[in-house]
Image (cartoon, grey):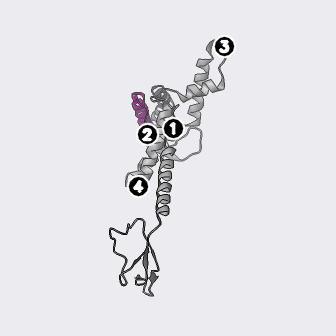
Amino acid sequence: MENMEGGFPPKKTEEVAPAQAYVVGAKQNPDGTMDYSSAVHMMPTEAQVKGAKEQKERETEAEAKKFEIPEDVKPGTATMLFYKLRNEKDFWEKAKNESSAQNLANIDVLNSMLTDANLQSKIEEKVKQEMTAGGAEVSAETIRQKLHELPAKEMVEYVQEFFVDRYKKLQDEKQDMVPLQQGHFSKEYATAYLLAIAQNLQNRLLEESRDPVAPKS
């Protein structure tokens, strides 16, 4: 425990770690200033310091674990890109700079396209037809696994058909604002913007198809 000097905040010395020490007994004056004349520096016990450090380590580990990519996700797949976009979104949320808002908005649209329910249903239907050709019986779990491992390069073709071609057609028809999801009364975006995002998604999928190594987190 260390006494304060006069009416001023404590000096930070080698003996008192600012991140660990705390002040007891400070009073607020009527004019809003603080009176430290009777205040003292309290140092936490060794057990408290150890406990706080361990808690911080647990929080850091839990935060990192949230963004781990499952071991069964293969590089070069559309699923891998989904997880990379998730982690990229976290990066921009933490960055909080002038680029963050637009980048976060772009990632949300990229994710909406990648996980679009109508698109996923169409892909599932095609995969099922291919796997059951000739009368073969295939379980629902086998089909889900096939979708889970869908090559990113193959997804590029679906994005072309489902988004790029549609937005180009809408542009030709002079429709400047359209909903993101076909058949949904969702938020409308500039058609040129959606076309650019769809093409960006294709580029990211192509990049993923050339990525030989899955990231650890």
Q: Residue furthest top?
A: 134
Q: Assign a secondary structure to mark 3.
A: helix
Q: Amino acid at mark 3?
A: Gly
- Magenta stretch in the rendered image: 195-214
- Residue 135 is tagged as 3
Front position in the image: 60 or 210:
60
Evaluate whether residue 49 shows in this view: yes
Residue tagged by mark 1? 113
Rounded to the nearest angstrom, the CA distance separating label 4 from label 3 is 54 Å
Q: Tell me, for residue 197, which label it has, or none.
A: 2
Looking at the rendered image, the quarter that the N terminus falls into is: bottom left
**Label 4 to label 2, Cα distance in Å?**
22 Å
Classify the position of the C terminus by image quarter: top left
Q: Amino acid at mark 2?
A: Ile
In the picture, residue 171 is in which quadrant?
top left
Residue occupying the far bottom of the picture: 30
Q: Earlier in the sequence, mark 4 or mark 2?
A: 4
Q: Which mark is residue 96?
A: 4
Q: Earlier in the sequence, mark 2 or mark 3?
A: 3
Alpha carbon distance from label 1 to label 3:
32 Å
Question: In terms of sequence position, does the residue under pointer 4 or pointer 3 come before the other?
Answer: 4
Where residue 14 appears, x then y in whole percent?
32, 67
